[in-house]
Amino acid sequence: MGKVISYLKPYRWAMVFAWMLMLIELTVELWHPIFMAKIIDEGILKEDLHAVILWGGIMVGMSLLGFAAGIINSFYSSHASQGFGFDVRAAVFKKVQSFSFNNLAQFQTSSLITRLTNDITQIQNTVFMSLRIALRSPLLIIGGVTMAFFVNMKLALILIAPIPILVVLLVWMMKLSGKLFRLVQDKLDKVNNVMQENLTAMRLIKAFIRRKFEENRFGKANEDLRNQTVKTLRLVELLGPILLFVMNLAILFILWFGAVDVHQARINVGEVVAIVNYGFRITMALSMLSWIIMAFSRGRASSQRINEVLETTVDLEDNASSYSIPKIKKGKVEFENVSFQYPGTNHLVLANISFTANPGETIALMGATGAGKSALFQLVPRLYDITSGAIKIDGIDIRDMTLDSLRKQIGFVPQESILFTGSVESNLEWGKEDATLQEIIESTTDAQIHGTITKLPEQYETKIGQKGVNLSGGQKQRLSIARALIRKPKLLFLDDSTSALDMKTEAKLLNALEKYDCTTFIITQKITTAMKADQILLLDDGELTASGSHEKLMKTSPLYQEIYKSQFIKEGLADVQ
């Protein structure tokens, strides 16, 4: 929890002022029973109106002071808690942004969303409560007991008798409820996960008529959350009636023995009223304390979950010796005995891969699903680090380059075309923030999407729905390619990102890429695309089984010949060679 609490430091003076104002409120509340006793003993019983007005006026004045202190306290408490929540939310989001793919695999997306929203709200509310009322309750109990001893020691002993037992019960309940509320948050993660999957895959759900199945799946997750929450709240709420019963029993004994002492003139009526008044205040404070413990337990569970994110070690960062490269000049890429396995696994995804891509060449990667093509792409911009070997760009090991300077010069188009809510133009500016309209139009023209954009209602200002829902697969792919081209990269990676394009559009796109002074890597399943490459890399189960031009592989690689025949011979297109 220490990492989370450290974000309270900028608000320490607001917290100090809030606690000082809370102490003023508490002081007013503790003196009220004394003033009430004075009114009864010196005013009402003696029929002295002046005493009633005097002590009554003091009570009203003190109440106004307490009211003002409470209002100002709320202002400082809100400032500290809301600012704290803002800072923690920003810190968690920044931390997630720094995560490597391996770090992200440790947390479900739905869990991160819950932590950024619900969990931070929980600890934000806990901070507000701690400044507004949390310390007030235990201090009211301590102060009430102390003041009661000043009024009458005998009755005060009756009042204090059950408190140690109740405090032990409260501490035990706090520890237990902390674990239970952690389970509640985990169940909430699962509900959010089902919701996220459903909203993302709604078209597929409708197409396969899986509505009933998904409703049942959500119902099960929702029911688990409800049951765990009810179980936890029932246990915590059970504490309230126990506290009230024990303290009300103590007040009954105070009234009983107080009445006896009043009849025997050993105590004033006002003193009994004051002790009873303290008893009621302590009872309410104990009841409030049970509610505070519930909120603190929930906040503690949430802070632990947030701490897990903040204290996660990012396993892919710049080395101490890394330096920024101003510009990749040539674009020569060398793989030297590169092997790679995903963190936490024992299986090599790539094994001893060696090849050289010369500046300006187009390299096509082919192979069956799971052969390691996408994994190879992810190694060059260091989305993952290699297990062994070396990857060099213009003779420099990529691990000696800073991540920012490396990635800024790479155009990367992933297999799944990801677009963001906003305009077409804002999505394209992801590639280059300060891109001019001329640069934007040039990139979209080369990506074969400019004509489509001009037909949209607001052209480049047209709003794109979530994940590009209002665009076709081919349109999303071409926008993603334009976003990569706009930065004029020295290295361009197209991860099967022309799969939704027809042969004519793809041919135009590949021809347009020739004017870019960059080394291009293309993952493709199409022989027609591979044939145009300067070099073809054929991967099979993580190993580079063959490399060379189309003509060379047709003579030397049985696997490539088989792929060629499957796409052309059966269709009577063998003459394409």
Image (tube, helix red, strand yellow):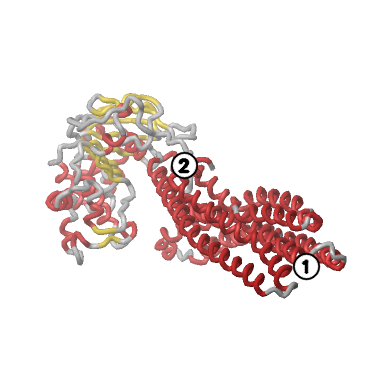
Residue 350 got which mark? none
- Left or right, residue 164 beside residue 75: right
132 over 432 or under it: above or below = below
Name the quadrant containing residue 517. Answer: top left
Q: Report the quarter where the C terminus lies.
A: top left
For residue 479, above or below residue 104: below
User: Residue 187 occupies which quadrant of the picture?
Assistant: bottom right
Query: What is the crowding at mark 2: few (fewer than 14 residues within 10 Å), some, or many (at least 20)?
Result: some
Q: Nearer the viewer, mark 2 or mark 1?
A: 1
Q: Inspect the image, locate mark 2, and give the three-letter code of the amino acid beneath it.
A: Leu
Helix, strand or loop at mark 1: helix
**Up-down: is 196 above or below 313?**
below
As measured in the structure, the alpha-carbon distance from the residue carrying label 2 to the one carrying label 1 is 59 Å
Which one is nearer the viewer's eye here, 520 or 402?
A: 402
In the picture, measured across the screen, residue 278 lies left or right of residue 18, that is right
Dot 1 amino acid type: Val
Q: CB under 8 Å between callouts 2 and 1?
A: no
Considering the numbered disc 2 on the image, is that residue within a helix, a strand or a loop?
helix
Q: Nearer the viewer, residue 48 or 94?
A: 48
Q: Which residue is mark 1?
A: 269
Q: Earlier in the sequence, mark 2 or mark 1?
A: 1
